[in-house]
Image (cartoon, rainbow, N blue to C red):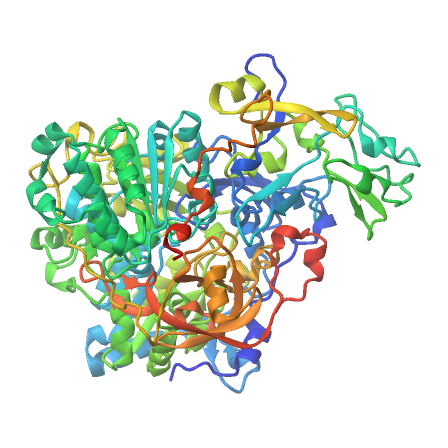
Amino acid sequence: MTSHFGDSPVFVIDQSRCIGCEACVQACVECGTHRGQSLIHLETIDRATTTQTAPMVCMHCQDPTCAQVCPADAIKQTEGGIVQSALKPRCIGCSNCVLACPFGVPKYMAELDQMMKCDMCTDRTSEGLKPMCASVCPSEALWYGTREEFAAGRRGELLREFRFGRQDVQTLVYTVVDDVEPGPLDVLTGRARSWLDDPFDLEETAS
Amino acid sequence: MARPPVSDEELTERYGPHLNEAPPGGWDHGLDPDRTVETHCCFCGQQCGIKLKVKDNEVIGFEPWYEFPFNEGKLCPKGVKRYLQGSHPDRLLHPLERDPSAAGGFRQVGWDRALDRVVSEIRRIQAEHGPDAFAMLSGVSLTNEKSYLIGKFARLALGTANLDYNGRFCMVSAGAGNKKALGVDRAPNPWSDIPLADVVWVAGSNVAETFPITTSYIWRARDRGARLIVQDPRVVPLARTADLFLPVRPGTDSALFGAVLHELIRRDWLDHEFIDEHTVGFDEAAAAVADMTPAWAASITGVAAARIEQAAEWWGTSATGMLLHARGIEQQSKGVDNVLGAINLGLATGKFGKPGCAVSTITGQGNGQGGREQGHKCDQLPGNRDITNPEHRAYVAGVWGCDESEIPGKGLSAEEIIEAIHDGSIKGLLSICFNPLVSAPDSNFTQEALDKLEFYAVIDFFLSESAQHADVVLPGSLHEEDEGTSTSGEGRIIKINAATEPPGEARLDWKILIDIAERLGRRKYFPYESTREIFEELRLASAGGTADYLGVTWERVEAEMGMFWPVPEVGHPGTPRLFEGGKFFHPDGKARFHPIPFRESAEVVDDEYPIWLTTGRVVSQYLSGTQTRRIGALVRQYPEPLCEMHPRLAEQLGVGDCDLVTVTSRRGDMTLPAHVVATIRPDTVFIPYHWPGAKAANQLTNRALDPISRMPEFKVAAVRIAPAAGRRDTTDERDLDLSEGGRDLSLR
């Protein structure tokens, strides 16, 4: 299903394709290691003006901020770089990780008194299966495969280096952008007008 | 009298909808199945492959079925949670008889008593009022085998002409248009053609919410550089990233298609060779659009002329293109006109019979494609045969072993059956998998009709709102409890496999029908011991018809993961793409253009009812909600209907988001929260229709029918809106965590 070229599969999020259907949320609840709990985030950006929604799985940072700020040393990475939920015996429920994560991923589950987060379905990927959310996602906004497969079939470029203030963050999970190095933005001349600026042509007919 | 026996509250307390929240044994029970069954989702026409995990005769979870080629493991939220309809507290386990003195309004009875009562009432009504005074309404969530059986059962066991199906409220306009223009009623291409299109035009289909998996096919085309055009009164989720958006006013699609044809002709973006060799009627169609300029269409449709010209240019100058349409253009009193107008664009540019080229409906219901081929439409016999055609009748009579005269003639369509019940000419009804109280237009009228029935029997697995009116309820089977085939929106015949057995005293649907036939003295026509035997007869009955299944075997369907009809002989490879080489299904092999002059919808806005209403679906609910309103996680995604309106309209009305508004049409009114969003035309409101009673959008809709397809006009009505007292916080679950916050949400 995956690796055709010896390259190991990667997880890719393309927020622009999200249709807000919640299949990912519903499927995350069905995952074998945390049945009944969804660990994925699906945000409605601003429903009053747009149907844009955005799914967020754990980005699995190389040097995870959540683990850095954990006073109990409860957040561990696997050898493959997967950042795991807090170890239950160690987690003190302080929620430092919840507040510190630059991507807003960890969830403090009060009922369990434990931080839980997406572990990219380690139980599935270790058996060669895709993570649950990337399996079901109808629009392939959440996608799991090799970079070669992505390059062969999908438009956009893969990005996994982020800068938050002075903090550089590299992640296992990729996002999709039109151009990884777009150069300086020219905000003065603006962009070409799109129908999205006025979907119903109200400006022309306003008077 | 077929009135609900007790109050809504008592019925709901006993029969639901209650919410199934977790798999059998709870979330912590483990997921260690006895076996895994490869089958398909029970919901929409995409029929996604899914594996159900089964333990102790209960479905305990699912696993993506990656190998099934259509969806490769993908599922929408309904597909993910579909397994929770099993092991459900509302499941009907015993035959029931209406009894106002019993708790919940029904008393449990034995099968013999229930069946005897049904048969004695059929006989009484038919003896007193004639055979057609007893009608049957069916559904296309049912397999091909059941659809075929029902067509034969109604004609030879009940002996009534009045059988119709709920596809009448779904895709009949597409079917009628396809037959008129192309000579056959099937999606022309497999979905694997969508990625080959250079332009994808989605007209009247909220693909992201109603056919979510199809978005991945459209993205594959866009990954190749294809342009996407979306034609819809709302900026639906797929439209958000479209290259061109055509915000068409409800009820004006044929004007838009006419203007595009006008432009194609004016700019000579035509495939003359294709038109000359493979079509007839172009000149008449061209004459009909001679005055339909983009500027004229802009004044009718509300879509700027420049956008119409752009759509024409992309469609006319692209080597390949797929125009996909669905209920938005079809559920109108001129649904067939709209479909024919769209097909004209495909014929004019030669976009048929080639890879990546088609004008195609996206069939809505699970077996909407197959169900409409096997003869349980009022006007059809198996193989898509015409019930008024003497040769067709004689052929089917030969397969059935009956005299041709024993097959009744053309009956009334679904809405006309409801109207005939209302006017008293139909006195008795048997329905299966059809909930017209929610899904039919003008639900106050439907309720009056059901109340007037002298006798109403229902076969279903939950007590739907319509079934609450029944005199006798026969507990049938769920999708996952029986085997058979269905035919997806692509025309792909697939195998449905049983995961569990019916619980309690519930029985397989087809066995119930045979039990009734036997009591009516007609067992000789129904000798089946298994659904496979029904399928073997279906193959013969369809042979030689357009929907020819003769060469289809269950073994090949499973081994090849689907077969595309027609399969006219054993060993035939099937026909994934129709019309190759420009060969259409009319006797002369040519397609038909149709002249489509513009006419208004049956109801137009005026001073009294100044706002357009259109209705539709949300991603988390399916049709009348009999199944999906019983699954907690799906209900929480969108718990109740909201009235979507543009901020400009909201300001005129003096209401804000979540304020209650009363929406009134000539048929009825309903009060519900406003959902103020800038993603809908300011002259139009949208209300989803999945709910019953006071929450039913169909209280407002119009019973006006398309003259050809007999499709009601769900998509266009005139309403007025006034602020109502109060407000109700609406939840959009996308912001919530379903497993946590969701659990605490009090449902209204």
Q: Is residue B382 visible?
A: no
Left or right of A97, for residue B629: left
Q: What percent of the width, then of the height, locates residue B50?
A: 51, 40
Q: Quadrant of the N terminus of chain B?
A: bottom left
User: Is B443 or B9 nearer to us in this picture?
Assistant: B443
Q: Residue at x 67, y 53 (%)?
A: B736
The relative height of residue B354 versus residue B339 in the rendered view (above or below) is: above
Left or right of B81, for residue B131: left
Q: Is residue B664 visible?
A: yes
User: Is B17 or A40 nearer to us in this picture?
Assistant: A40
Q: What percent of the width, then of the height, locates residue B428?
A: 30, 77
Q: What percent of the width, then of the height, locates residue B178?
A: 21, 46
Which residue, as the protein is rendered here, is positioned at the far top? A6
Numbered-mark total: 0
User: Is A102 or B512 nearer to us in this picture?
Assistant: A102
Residue A6, quarter of picture = top right
Q: Residue at x 49, y 30 (%)?
A: B67
User: Is B669 or A87 nearer to us in this picture?
Assistant: B669
Q: What percent of the width, then of the height, locates residue A137?
A: 55, 38
The relative height of residue B397 versus residue A24 in the rendered view (above or below) is: below
Q: Quadrant of the C terminus of chain B?
A: bottom right
Left or right of A192, for residue B566: left
Residue A39, quarter of picture = top right
The relative height of residue A179 versus residue B92 in the rendered view (above or below) is: above
